[in-house]
Image: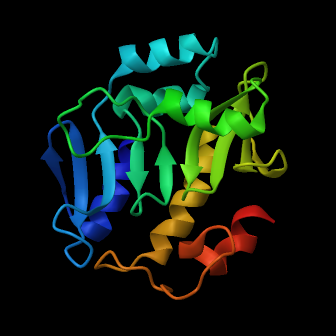
Amino acid sequence: MNEILLKLEAKWGGFARNGHALCNKQMPFVSTKAYLNVLYEPQMDSIQKAYNTLSATILPGLMDFYKQYNGCRLFFSSLNIFGIQCFDDEIYEPFDFESENRNIQETFKNSDYIFFGSLGGDYAFAYKKDECSQIYAIQKGKKKILKTFDNFETWFSYYLDVLYEEYDDEGRKKHPNKRYKDIPALYHETNKFFY
């Protein structure tokens, strides 16, 4: 997983520590507190407790990620891996694993799926408790599986690579006016992502 840092640093410079977060590429055109990429220091005990609460085993590749990071918000929260919010006084926190699972399950209603990440605010990524292998891209609020990946590494590199190309050296989207119906920031990429 160190290659994530190296790839992001190669294009947008080093990461700066801000509390328990590692922040990369400040975006002053959005806010002085906005960063393109944020990774969070590991909180493995808290992560394990959260997964135990849902009676879930952590997906193997995801476990490797969690050993180094407590989630992430990459490309201005376009690609997210849920973590644990454990520092109330900090500005930068990951989307909370337990809260996100509760919220998504309100409409998904299938506790066999463990949700661990999202693309923007409209799509979620999950795996089945009893399989703990394949990853499913699911539109929030619906039960339709849009895309399946064989493992965490394939899933992560697929979205990381597409989004990496979408943002320029300044941290701006190359196609800011094109929109999806469901993911406004990435309309032109819909077919690549799911079909």
Quarter of image, res 9: bottom left
The residue under the point 83% across, 44% down is: 143
Pick the front one: 22 or 88: 88
- Residue 100 falls left or right of residue 111: left
Which residue is the extreme one toward the right? 144
Pick the front one: 72 or 96: 96
In the rendered image, residue 183, in percent from the top left (x then y), is placed at 61, 68
- Up the image or down, 6 lies above or below 63; here it is below
Number of numbered discs:
0
Quarter of image, res 134: top right
- Residue 7 falls left or right of residue 174: left
Viewport quadrant of the N terminus = top left
- Residue 167 falls left or right of residue 93: right
Quarter of image, res 126: top right
In the rendered image, residue 56, in percent from the top left (x then y), is placed at 64, 16
In the rendered image, residue 18, in percent from the top left (x then y), is placed at 15, 45
The residue under the point 38% across, 41% down is: 94
- Up the image or down, 133 lies above or below 129; here it is below
- Up the image or down, 3 lies above or below 60; here it is below
The scheme the figure's colours follow is rainbow
In the rendered image, residue 182, in percent from the top left (x then y), is placed at 67, 68
The residue under the point 21% across, 69% down is: 31
Pick the front one: 127 or 99: 99
Viewport quadrant of the C terminus = bottom right
The residue under the point 56% across, 32% down is: 61
